[in-house]
């Protein structure tokens, strides 16, 4: 079943208002979630709404945070998110990074004491309208076993980079540092389907295709799947995100990161505060004239798109192409939701006495 973007966004905004968010924060949070649905990242859209509500119910999310800068230089800052929605805290931080970049050429902000922030791409793309490159990353609860490990130590820890262009659509790379994001595993569970080979392992460290294996003590695998296919590189990428997002900011890292499901107990003896993010903005004209760069960026994209495709494929894809195409279709035809997600949203509507 499909639903219009405007109606879903309005509903989501009403839910955040019922949680006690300000009008500004409710609009911001809803915008991040619906942006994910538009771009085809269904695992991070309104399907996650019930998770935020449950975190709020157990008082792990503060609907009225006092977000503040706790350390600052001309080009950097560290922010305390006051346990706010990451959907609100991360855009706040990105705005600071952009303002610093306007003055210093680049701006970098580390964030602690936050929560799940939606899709990484949303925050990096905020820099595009300012002729800036944007970078965004976040750590997450430990569901990933490092190469050669049985134990879950890292999150899916995504990275997103957005680069402005002139005539071509912007380059937007947004990816987890695991073979697949946990949200995609959740979608397979809702569909009662198996996971592809190389996505997960069981609690003894053996490969499996059981999409529900995380509930049985299993783990997601780093990008690459196994050592033969370079899982050590995915492990390194996830580690870099963890260090930038949390060790640098003062958030929890590694196995101490708070879990997203509200029913999972918080790790004992935390080493920081909340979840951590890291965002940055780089002014293009801090390196070369913006128009020169954007013209060459257009040329880069056109040449890559014109590369001879491999058999069975029509064209080489530029990072951001599938999401942009999805957004055009879904804005016109509606956003498809799985029945379990629809039931969750109906439950939220009943809880807050609002119309779905």
Image (cartoon, helix red, strand yellow):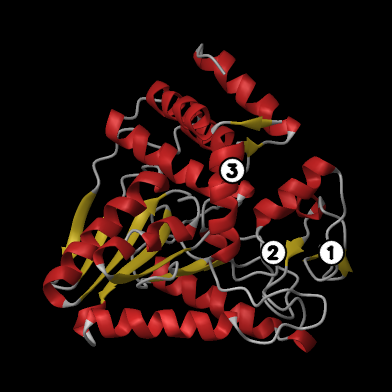
Q: Disc 1 and disc 2: Cα gap in Å?
A: 10 Å
- Report the mark closest to the observer, 2 or 3: 3
Q: Disc 3 and disc 1: Cα gap in Å?
A: 27 Å
Q: Residues within 10 Å of mark 2 (few under 14, many from 20)?
A: many
Q: Mark 1 highlights which residue?
A: 196
Left or right: 20 as drawn, with respect to 145: left
Left or right: 47 as drawn, with respect to 123: right
Asked if disc 1 and disc 2 are in contact, CB closer than 8 Å, the reply is yes
Q: Earlier in the sequence, mark 1 or mark 2?
A: 2
Q: Residues within 10 Å of mark 1 (few under 14, many from 20)?
A: some
Residue at 45 percent across and 38 percent down: it is 60
Whether residue 141 is visible here, answered yes or no, is no
Q: Mark 2 highlights which residue?
A: 180
Q: Mark 3 highlights which residue?
A: 330
Q: In the picture, which quadrant includes the N terminus?
A: top right
Residue at 82 percent across and 53 percent down: it is 211
Q: Earlier in the sequence, mark 3 or mark 1?
A: 1
Q: In front: 111, or 288?
A: 288
Element carrying mark 2: loop
Q: Disc 2 and disc 3: Cα gap in Å?
A: 23 Å
Q: Earlier in the sequence, mark 2 or mark 3?
A: 2
Element carrying mark 3: helix
Element carrying mark 1: loop
């Amino acid at each position: 079943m499909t639903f219009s973007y405007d109606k879903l966004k309005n509903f989501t905004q009403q839910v955040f208002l019922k949680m006690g968010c300000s009008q500004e924060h409710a609009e911001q949070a809803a915008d991040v979630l619906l942006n994910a649905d538009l771009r085809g990242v269904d695992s991070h859209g309104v399907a996650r709404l019930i998770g935020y509500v449950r975190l709020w119910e157990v008082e792990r999310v503060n609907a009225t945070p006092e977000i503040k800068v706790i350390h600052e230089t001309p080009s950097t800052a560290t922010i305390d998110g006051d346990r706010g929605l990451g959907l609100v805290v991360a855009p706040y931080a990105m705005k600071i990074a952009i303002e610093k970049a306007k003055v210093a050429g680049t701006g970098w902000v580390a964030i602690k004491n936050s929560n799940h922030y939606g899709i990484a791409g949303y925050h990096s793309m905020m820099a595009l309208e300012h002729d800036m490159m944007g970078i965004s990353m976040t750590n997450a609860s430990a569901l990933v076993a490092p190469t050669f490990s049985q134990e879950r130590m890292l999150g899916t820890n995504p990275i997103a980079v957005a680069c402005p262009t002139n005539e071509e659509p912007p380059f937007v790379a947004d990816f987890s540092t695991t073979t697949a994001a946990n949200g995609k595993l959740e979608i397979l569970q809702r569909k009662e389907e198996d996971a592809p080979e190389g996505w997960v392992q069981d609690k003894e460290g053996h490969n499996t295709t059981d999409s529900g294996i995380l509930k049985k003590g299993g783990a997601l695998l780093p990008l690459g799947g196994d050592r033969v296919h370079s899982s050590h590189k995915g492990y390194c990428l996830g580690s870099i995100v963890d260090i930038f997002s949390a060790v640098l900011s003062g958030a929890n890292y590694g196995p101490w990161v708070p879990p997203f499901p509200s029913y999972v107990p918080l790790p004992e003896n935390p080493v920081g505060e909340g979840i951590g993010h890291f965002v940055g903005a780089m002014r293009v004209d801090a390196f070369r004239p913006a128009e020169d760069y954007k013209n060459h960026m257009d040329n880069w994209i056109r040449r890559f798109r014109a590369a001879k495709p491999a058999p069975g494929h029509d064209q080489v894809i530029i990072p951001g192409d599938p999401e942009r195409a999805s957004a055009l279709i879904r804005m016109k035809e509606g956003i498809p939701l799985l029945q379990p997600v629809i039931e969750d949203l109906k439950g939220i509507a009943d809880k807050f006495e609002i119309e779905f």
